[in-house]
Amino acid sequence: MSAPVGIDELLERVRAGYTRVGPQEAYAASRSGALLVDIRYQALRERDGLIPGALVVERNELEWRLDPRGSHRAAEATGHDLQVVVVCNEGYASSLAAASLHALGLSRATDLTGGFQAWKAAGLPVTPAA
């Protein structure tokens, strides 16, 4: 059994396994075909709005919806080579989510540093929730 780790150390470990992207990089990636996946819970989406074109998948469903082999996959989950940028509110939960997607074989999964709040602060497109 391995020694227990704190969340800060765990985040550091999982983030070392891939390159995170900032808001402008995420925006450029989405315009080049990457799938932005918003894992924020509904109250945050209703409060702050949505990233146009992002697939909304709450965190507890992420692996089932993005597994290209899964019976509950989203239509956008087209293959293991899909570039995915996971977006949470501030860029913490998305790191753990991206690591989980890596474990499923989605080797091009990453997350947005600073999350939705950084996207919004950068002046990138946001639409009010319906």
Image (spheres, rainbow, N blue to C red):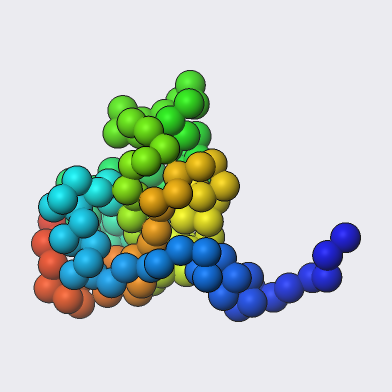
- Figure disc tally: 0
User: As drawn, which residue projects farthest toward the top?
Assistant: 71
Q: Is residue 46 above or below residue 12?
A: above
Task: State the residue in front, 87 or 127.
Answer: 87
Task: State the residue in front, 112 or 17.
Answer: 17
Residue 108 position, x and y percent, is 39, 51
Left or right of 81 on screen, residue 130: left
Query: On the rendered image, what quadrant is the N terminus found in?
Result: bottom right
User: As drawn, which residue projects farthest toward the right?
Assistant: 1
Decide if residue 21 is in sight here.
yes
Which residue occupies 53% across, 60% down? 96
Left or right of 46 on screen, residue 13: right
Q: Is residue 124 above or below residue 83?
A: below
Q: Is residue 35 above or below residue 64?
A: below
Which residue occupies 38% across, 62% down? 111
Residue 40 position, x and y percent, is 38, 56
Which residue occupies 28% across, 51% down? 36
Which residue occupies 13% across, 52% down? 31
Left or right of 13 on screen, residue 46: left
Residue 87 position, x and y percent, is 35, 59
Residue 8 position, x and y percent, is 60, 78
Decide if residue 65 is in sight here.
no
